[in-house]
Image (cartoon, helix red, strand yellow):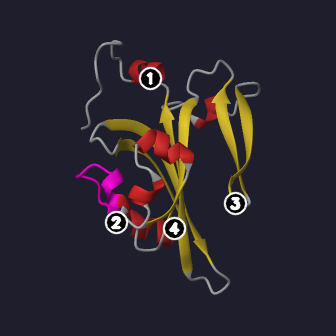
Amino acid sequence: MVGQSIDDLVAPGKLRCTAMHDVLPGRHVLLLHDKDGGAATTDYAFLSLDAGGRVLAWYEGAKRIYGYKSEEIIGQDASCLCLEDVDFEGELKRTALDGHLGAEGWHKRQNGSRFWANSLTTALRDGNEELRVLCEWCGTLARGTLLANNGLQENSQPNPP
Protein backbone atom coordinates (compact mmCIF):
# COMPACT_ATOMS: atom_id res chain seq x y z
CA MET A 1 0.00 0.00 0.00
CA VAL A 2 2.95 2.30 0.61
CA GLY A 3 3.55 4.43 -2.46
CA GLN A 4 0.19 3.69 -4.10
CA SER A 5 -2.24 6.43 -5.00
CA ILE A 6 -5.41 6.75 -2.93
CA ASP A 7 -7.49 6.07 -6.08
CA ASP A 8 -5.79 2.69 -6.49
CA LEU A 9 -6.33 1.82 -2.83
CA VAL A 10 -10.05 2.57 -2.78
CA ALA A 11 -10.84 0.68 -5.99
CA PRO A 12 -13.62 -1.88 -5.33
CA GLY A 13 -12.29 -5.24 -4.18
CA LYS A 14 -8.77 -3.92 -3.64
CA LEU A 15 -8.62 -3.98 0.18
CA ARG A 16 -9.53 -6.33 3.00
CA CYS A 17 -9.63 -5.40 6.66
CA THR A 18 -8.98 -6.89 10.07
CA ALA A 19 -10.87 -5.54 13.09
CA MET A 20 -9.14 -5.60 16.46
CA HIS A 21 -11.18 -4.78 19.53
CA ASP A 22 -10.01 -3.18 22.79
CA VAL A 23 -6.40 -2.69 21.63
CA LEU A 24 -6.32 0.12 24.17
CA PRO A 25 -8.99 0.29 26.84
CA GLY A 26 -12.20 1.11 24.95
CA ARG A 27 -10.39 1.69 21.63
CA HIS A 28 -10.79 -0.35 18.45
CA VAL A 29 -8.63 -0.45 15.32
CA LEU A 30 -9.39 -1.42 11.76
CA LEU A 31 -6.29 -2.54 9.83
CA LEU A 32 -6.43 -2.30 6.03
CA HIS A 33 -4.52 -4.78 3.84
CA ASP A 34 -4.11 -5.41 0.13
CA LYS A 35 -6.30 -8.32 -1.01
CA ASP A 36 -3.12 -10.18 -1.94
CA GLY A 37 -1.57 -9.37 1.46
CA GLY A 38 1.36 -7.59 -0.19
CA ALA A 39 1.67 -4.60 2.14
CA ALA A 40 0.15 -5.86 5.35
CA THR A 41 1.91 -4.94 8.53
CA THR A 42 3.62 -7.79 10.34
CA ASP A 43 3.49 -6.37 13.83
CA TYR A 44 2.16 -3.31 15.57
CA ALA A 45 2.71 -1.43 18.80
CA PHE A 46 0.48 0.74 20.93
CA LEU A 47 1.83 3.19 23.46
CA SER A 48 0.62 6.26 25.31
CA LEU A 49 2.59 9.41 26.05
CA ASP A 50 1.93 12.35 28.33
CA ALA A 51 1.85 15.87 26.86
CA GLY A 52 5.61 16.19 27.45
CA GLY A 53 6.44 13.02 25.51
CA ARG A 54 7.09 10.64 28.43
CA VAL A 55 5.80 7.08 28.11
CA LEU A 56 2.67 6.47 30.20
CA ALA A 57 1.57 3.05 28.94
CA TRP A 58 3.47 0.32 27.11
CA TYR A 59 1.74 -2.67 25.57
CA GLU A 60 2.99 -6.11 24.47
CA GLY A 61 3.37 -5.17 20.80
CA ALA A 62 5.61 -2.25 21.75
CA LYS A 63 7.78 -4.64 23.75
CA ARG A 64 8.07 -6.97 20.73
CA ILE A 65 8.97 -4.21 18.30
CA TYR A 66 11.12 -1.88 20.39
CA GLY A 67 12.61 -4.38 22.87
CA TYR A 68 11.89 -2.44 26.09
CA LYS A 69 10.00 -4.04 28.97
CA SER A 70 7.30 -1.79 30.42
CA GLU A 71 9.23 -1.29 33.66
CA GLU A 72 12.25 -0.07 31.65
CA ILE A 73 10.42 2.48 29.48
CA ILE A 74 7.44 3.86 31.43
CA GLY A 75 8.32 7.36 32.60
CA GLN A 76 11.14 7.72 30.06
CA ASP A 77 11.21 10.30 27.28
CA ALA A 78 9.89 8.64 24.11
CA SER A 79 12.53 10.41 22.02
CA CYS A 80 14.71 7.34 22.74
CA LEU A 81 12.52 5.52 20.17
CA CYS A 82 13.53 7.95 17.40
CA LEU A 83 16.72 8.38 15.43
CA GLU A 84 18.79 11.39 16.40
CA ASP A 85 17.80 13.47 13.34
CA VAL A 86 14.08 13.40 14.21
CA ASP A 87 12.60 16.61 15.68
CA PHE A 88 10.67 14.78 18.40
CA GLU A 89 9.56 17.94 20.23
CA GLY A 90 8.37 19.44 16.94
CA GLU A 91 6.35 16.30 16.22
CA LEU A 92 4.74 16.49 19.67
CA LYS A 93 3.77 20.12 19.12
CA ARG A 94 2.40 19.37 15.65
CA THR A 95 0.34 16.44 16.99
CA ALA A 96 -1.10 18.59 19.78
CA LEU A 97 -1.94 21.40 17.34
CA ASP A 98 -3.40 19.28 14.51
CA GLY A 99 -4.90 16.54 16.69
CA HIS A 100 -3.00 13.78 14.95
CA LEU A 101 0.21 13.04 13.05
CA GLY A 102 0.82 10.25 10.58
CA ALA A 103 4.36 9.41 9.56
CA GLU A 104 6.48 6.80 7.85
CA GLY A 105 10.12 6.47 8.76
CA TRP A 106 12.89 4.94 10.82
CA HIS A 107 12.42 4.01 14.47
CA LYS A 108 15.05 2.84 16.96
CA ARG A 109 15.00 -0.32 19.08
CA GLN A 110 16.47 -0.64 22.55
CA ASN A 111 19.53 -2.42 21.10
CA GLY A 112 20.15 0.51 18.72
CA SER A 113 19.01 -1.27 15.54
CA ARG A 114 16.56 0.49 13.20
CA PHE A 115 13.29 -0.54 11.61
CA TRP A 116 10.98 1.12 9.08
CA ALA A 117 7.39 1.68 10.18
CA ASN A 118 4.21 3.66 9.72
CA SER A 119 2.92 5.46 12.78
CA LEU A 120 -0.16 7.42 13.75
CA THR A 121 -0.22 9.56 16.87
CA THR A 122 -3.49 11.02 18.14
CA ALA A 123 -3.95 13.75 20.74
CA LEU A 124 -6.71 13.00 23.26
CA ARG A 125 -8.24 15.94 25.12
CA ASP A 126 -10.49 16.20 28.16
CA GLY A 127 -13.82 18.04 28.37
CA ASN A 128 -11.98 21.36 28.80
CA GLU A 129 -9.95 20.72 25.62
CA GLU A 130 -6.76 20.23 27.68
CA LEU A 131 -4.31 17.77 26.16
CA ARG A 132 -4.38 14.67 28.37
CA VAL A 133 -2.52 11.96 26.46
CA LEU A 134 -0.99 11.11 23.10
CA CYS A 135 -1.76 7.63 21.80
CA GLU A 136 0.52 6.15 19.16
CA TRP A 137 0.07 3.19 16.85
CA CYS A 138 3.19 1.95 15.07
CA GLY A 139 3.12 -0.80 12.43
CA THR A 140 6.22 -2.42 10.97
CA LEU A 141 6.22 -3.36 7.31
CA ALA A 142 6.79 -6.90 6.10
CA ARG A 143 10.46 -7.36 5.12
CA GLY A 144 9.65 -8.45 1.56
CA THR A 145 7.42 -5.44 0.99
CA LEU A 146 10.06 -3.07 2.32
CA LEU A 147 12.74 -4.59 0.08
CA ALA A 148 10.51 -4.56 -3.00
CA ASN A 149 9.45 -0.96 -2.46
CA ASN A 150 13.07 0.11 -2.17
CA GLY A 151 14.34 -2.05 -5.07
CA LEU A 152 16.66 -4.00 -2.76
CA GLN A 153 17.88 -7.59 -2.76
CA GLU A 154 17.05 -9.92 0.17
CA ASN A 155 20.64 -9.75 1.50
CA SER A 156 20.85 -5.94 1.39
CA GLN A 157 19.78 -3.54 4.13
CA PRO A 158 17.92 -0.29 3.63
CA ASN A 159 19.74 2.69 5.06
CA PRO A 160 18.25 5.80 6.60
CA PRO A 161 18.59 9.00 4.58
Amino acid type at mark 1: Arg
Labels 3, 4: front one: 3
Query: Of the residues under marks 3 and 1, which one precedes in the sequence?
Result: 3
Q: Residue at x 39, y 62 (%)?
A: 91
Quadrant, the C terminus: top left
Q: Locate residue 159 relative to residue 10 in the image: left or right.
A: left
Give me the C-alpha separation between circle 3 and circle 4. Answer: 23 Å
Q: Residue at x 57, y 21 (%)?
A: 38
- Residue furthest out toward the front: 71
Examine the rendered structure and indicate whether residue 24 appears above or below residue 133: above
Circle number at residue 98: 4
Examine the rendered structure and indicate whether residue 83 appears above or below residue 101: above
In what element is the residue under mark 2? Answer: helix
**Is 81 one of the magenta-colored residues?**
yes
Find disc 1 in the rendering and name its residue: 143
The x, y position of residue 51, in whole percent, is 46, 74
Circle number at residue 120: none
- In depth, the one of 27 and 88 nearer the eye is 27
Quadrant, the N terminus: top right
Give me the C-alpha separation between circle 3 and circle 1. Answer: 30 Å
Query: Of the residues under marks 3 and 2, which one precedes in the sequence?
Result: 3
Find disc 3 in the rendering and name its residue: 25
